[in-house]
Image (cartoon, rainbow, N blue to C red):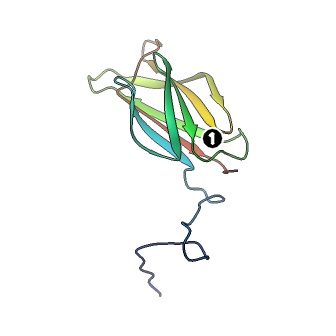
């Protein structure tokens, strides 16, 4: 059995970073503070927009090949109130995704932690 140990992976040209364009790794993800509105951490996310209470748009640095990608969301509230994802009017575009947050009473609410993950192919 062989062991491969590396500190850095680069593309075959020796300098470019390795891209994940055709693999099943997440192509975009973001961890957003919806209560004070700000990205905590993200990957392939150029910006987030607050469209109103519990309504967020995430723009991508690298677009997807089409809008038929899959997204998942999870969310929570540090005060103990339960939140759940609402998909009634989400929208997918090749350069952004819009998702909504609602509480257990089915009311629009800003989640303290709102995370979105995207799986699909990059353009």
* Residue in the image at 46% along x and 40% along y: 30
Residue 34 image-quadrant placement:
top left
Disc 1 crowd, CA 10 A, few/some/many (<14, 14-19, 20+): few
In the image, is residue 54 above or below residue 32?
Answer: above
Direction front: furthest residue: 15
From this viewpoint, which residue is outermost toward the left? Answer: 79
> Disc 1 designates what residue?
70
**Residue toward you, 60 or 73:** 60
Left or right of 40 on screen, residue 29: right
Image coordinates of residue 45 in percent, x first then y, are 51, 42
Please state which of residues 85 and 116 is positioned toward the viewer in this rendering: 116
Q: Residue, x 57% and y 36% (percent of image)? A: 59
SS of the residue under disc 1: strand
Percent coordinates x, y for residue 109 in the rendering: 42, 16
Residue 75: percent from left, percent from top: 41, 30
Along the line of sight, the residue nearer the viewer: 87 or 11: 11
């Amino acid at each position: 059995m062989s062991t491969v140990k590396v500190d850095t992976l680069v593309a075959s040209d020796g300098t470019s970073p390795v891209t994940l364009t055709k693999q099943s790794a997440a192509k975009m993800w973001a961890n957003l503070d919806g209560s004070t509105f700000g990205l905590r951490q993200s990957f392939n996310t150029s910006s987030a927009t607050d469209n109103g209470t519990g309504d967020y748009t995430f723009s991508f640095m690298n677009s997807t090949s089409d809008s038929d990608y899959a997204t998942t969301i999870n969310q929570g509230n540090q005060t103990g109130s339960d939140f759940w994802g609402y998909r009634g009017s989400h929208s997918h575009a090749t350069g952004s995704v819009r998702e909504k947050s609602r509480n257990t009473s089915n009311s629009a609410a800003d989640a303290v932690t709102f995370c979105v993950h995207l799986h699909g192919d990059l353009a």
